[in-house]
Image (cartoon, rainbow, N blue to C red):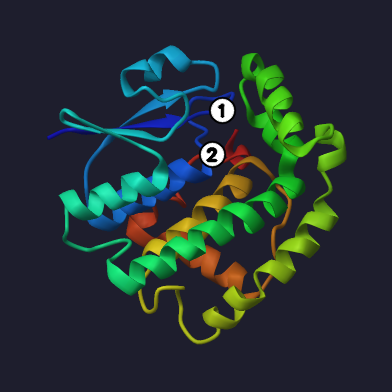
Amino acid sequence: MAITLYDLCGRDERLRFSPYCWRVRMALAHKGLEYTTVPWRFLDKEALAFADYDKVPVLTDGDTVVTDSFEIMRYLDKAYPANPVLGEGVGYQRVHFFKLFIERSVTPALFRTVALDLLAAIHPDDRAYFRETREARFGMRLEDVNNPEQGRAQLKKLLAPVRDQLRSSPFLDGEAPSGADYLLFGSMMWAYTVSLESLVDANDPVDEWFKRMLEVHEAVAGKSITIRDL
């Protein structure tokens, strides 16, 4: 069956920056599954009407439609059990906890670091929507949310246990990347794709891990388009 991923794009259709879509793209690469992508923009709600959903990622696999990045990762494990991404039992519970940590702590710190770069990366027709929805979420103007120095300081503290873990193994999930790696990498790739801001110190274990992640699975992430290429 043909797999299709509806994937957020920016001002250039080749610029794909959604942290949640990157989770799925890495999971698909992990499993060696072929797929096609459909570029999607924030205001193109009608394109997702078939899924009864208004945001990406949306994945179709034949007649099956799956929404929400984590649910897509779970679906891929069930439909294609070879090379599991999230696992089951205790392992699954741990990676689910890590998901919550990333979404509620790490991603807001990254947003603070690159908020205005994100705004610039978005298609001009979508910028008013992006500003309105994000300012409502944070309760302040994007210009006030955007504070790269503060964001990096917050991120450094939050990633302390990740840093310690990476001192003993090349990836969060051990000798090879898997679910936990893709969850964190998706958010960091989101910021890396749209901004020239440094996210962590050079030679930090997290920085070295991120470079490794860019090269895994035939460099599916490393070969992607970033603002550096536009």
Residue 7 percent location from the top left of the image: 42, 32
Front residue of 13/111: it is: 111
> Percent from the top left, x then y, of residue 173?
40, 73
Q: Is residue 17 left or right of residue 114?
A: left
| Amino acid beneath label 1 | Gly
Q: Residue furthest bottom?
A: 168
x and y percentages locating residue 55 in the rendered image: 47, 28
- Is disc 1 placed on a helix, strand or loop? loop
Q: Is residue 154 left or right of residue 143?
A: left
Residue drawn at x 76%, y 31% as measured from the top left: 135
Task: Using the rendered image of the protein, determine whether residue 62 is visible from the camera's viewpoint.
Answer: yes
Direction from residue 103 to residue 111 in the image, left or right:
right
Position of the C terminus, as image quadrant, is: top right
Numbered tag placed on residue 10 in the rendering: 1
The image's mark for residue 184 is: none
Q: CA distance from mark 1 to mark 2?
A: 7 Å
Q: Are marks 1 and 2 in contact (CB under 8 Å)?
A: yes
Secondary element under disc 2, as helix, strand or loop, is: loop
Residue at position x 52%, y 45% in the image: 19
Task: Tell me which amino acid carries mark 2.
Answer: Phe
Residue lying at 50% horizontally and 36% vertically, measured from the top left: 16
Q: Is residue 201 visible?
A: no
Q: Nearer the viewer, residue 58 or 126?
A: 58
Q: Nearer the viewer, residue 91 or 215?
A: 91
